[in-house]
Amino acid sequence: MPARKTTPKQSQNLKRGFKAEAERTASLYRKALALADNAPMPARELATHLGITILIPQEIPGITQALLDVLLGDEGREQWSAAIFTKNDKKYIIHNPTHSLARQESNIMHEVSHAICKHQLKELEYAIKGMVIPLREYDHVQEAEAEHLGACLQLPRTALVHHYCILKRSNEQIAQIFNASKKMVSFRLSVTGVSKLKFGT
């Protein structure tokens, strides 16, 4: 898929109750992985739990050097982030390994969220073409859902309250603990209202 940008308009595409359900989903998967509600949940561990294989372009059988040059070259690296697709009824996520580790985490969690939301996935050949042609159209509602759920899975409100309000950790410290960008931490603290809570709340 093309590189993603979070926009305020995306929240308008979320159905009523989706945000609360996303928080519950983040808690349920942490329980399934024997993690505390305030603990990090690595995207790769969640993907493995869901039976999703994670790949980088070099691991795709039969991929040409010319296509690798497009995907991983200077022009391609900012044109796509990740994509989820199926092959022989199995789910795969291909992601851009040239991005920062924090961005890779966000990219993969976003694609995992598509699977959790049971969004319709494309076949491998279409996914590859979609990365070469980054102007592919997307279902805006599905993208908004995956964007919000992915961020929630990575940084649920419960975890933010614990680390920001109770332990009084800085945005940078939280970012390091959860392998997130500082921008993502600030965004989640804002949209969840945690940044306005008082210490100990």
Image: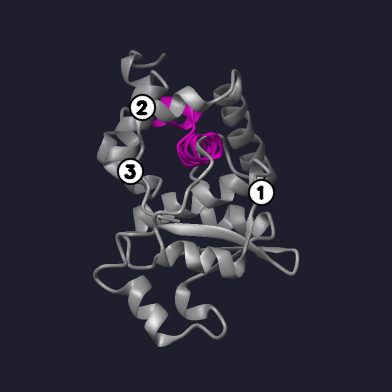
Residue 195 percent location from the top left of the image: 32, 21
**117 to 19, vertically: above or below:** below
Whether residue 162 is visible to the viewer of this picture, yes or no, is no
Residue 127's quadrant in the figure? bottom right
Q: Quadrant of the C terminus?
A: top left
Say which residue label 2 marks: 8
Which residues are drawn in magenta? 141-166
Residue 119 percent location from the top left of the image: 65, 45
Residue type at tag 2: Pro
| Foreground label between 3 and 1 | 1
Tags 2 and 3 in contact by the CB under 8 Å rule? no
Residue at 64% from the left image edge and 54% from the top image edge: 121
Say which residue label 3 marks: 175
Residue 159 within the segment the image draws in magenta: yes
On residue 120, the disc is 1
Residue at 51% from the left image edge and 58% from the top image edge: 83
- Nearest the viewer among 168 and 157 is 157
| Foreground label between 2 and 3 | 2
| Foreground label between 2 and 1 | 1
Residue 35 percent location from the top left of the image: 59, 43
First in sequence, mark 2 or 1: give its number: 2
Residue type at tag 1: Gln
